[in-house]
Amino acid sequence: MSLFQCEICGCCENTALACQGFVYMADCFDWSYAPEREGKRLCSACGPVSYKTEGPTEYGRWHDQFERIYLPIGMFRTNERGNLSHIETGSEDFKAHAITAEVQP
Ligand SMILES: [Zn+2]
C-alpha cells in the first residue's frame, strides 16, 4: 500500500482506501457519471459511485480515515518507498505544498 495523488482533485490518497486508485479494476465500475475519469488514479471521493452490475460502491465520498490534503495537480508522484514526493525537488514533505484555501465538493 502506498500514497498517490488523485489525478482529478489532486489530493493525497492511500491505495488501500481507494481500490488501488481504481486503475486495476476499472472494468468493474460504471463510469457514466464521469467518463473522463476512467483509467485515471482517483481518490475515494472522486472514485466511481456504482459498479456495473452490483449497485452502489462505498466511494464517491472521502473515507475520513485521515485528513484530505489537496496538492497542486501533477506535481507529485509515488516514490520507491510508497510515499508521495514532489517531482521537482524529491521532497516527501507534501504537506508543505497543501492547498488550504480551495474548497472542493
Ligand atoms: Zn480526488
Image (cartoon, rainbow, N blue to C red):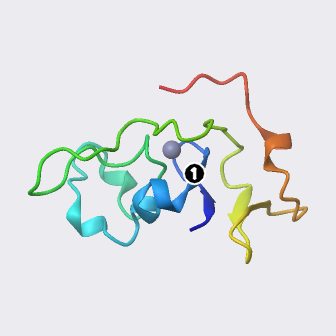
What amino acid type is highlighted by mark number 1?
Glu
Q: Is residue 75 left or right of residue 4?
A: right
Q: Is residue 104 left or right of residue 34?
A: right
Q: Residue furthest front?
A: 65
Q: Is residue 100 left or right of residue 47?
A: right
Residue drawn at x 35%, y 39% as measured from the top left:
60
The spot of residue 37 in percent (x, y) is 39, 53
Looking at the picture, tell me which residue is in the foreground, 25 or 1: 1
Q: Which residue is mark 1?
A: 13
**Residue 59 visible at all:** yes
**Residue 40 visible at all:** no
As helix, strand or loop, the secondary structure at mark 1 comes to strand
Residue drawn at x 46%, y 40% as measured from the top left:
63
Q: Residue furthest left?
A: 53
Please state the total of marks drawn on the protein image.
1
Establish whether ligand 1 lies closer than 8 Å to the Cβ of label 1: yes
Q: If the image is split into quadrants, where does the N terminus sit?
A: bottom right
Residue 88 sits above or below residue 33 on the image = below
Dot 1, crowdedness within 10 Å: few (<14), some or many (≥20)?
many
The spot of residue 19 in percent (x, y) is 40, 60
Residue drawn at x 27%, y 43% as measured from the top left:
49
Q: Is residue 75 left or right of residue 66?
A: right
Residue drawn at x 83%, y 58% as measured from the top left:
92
The spot of residue 50 in percent (x, y) is 21, 47
Residue 54 sits above or below residue 104 on the image = below
The spot of residue 33 in percent (x, y) is 25, 42
Looking at the picture, tell me which residue is in the foreground, 88 or 84: 84
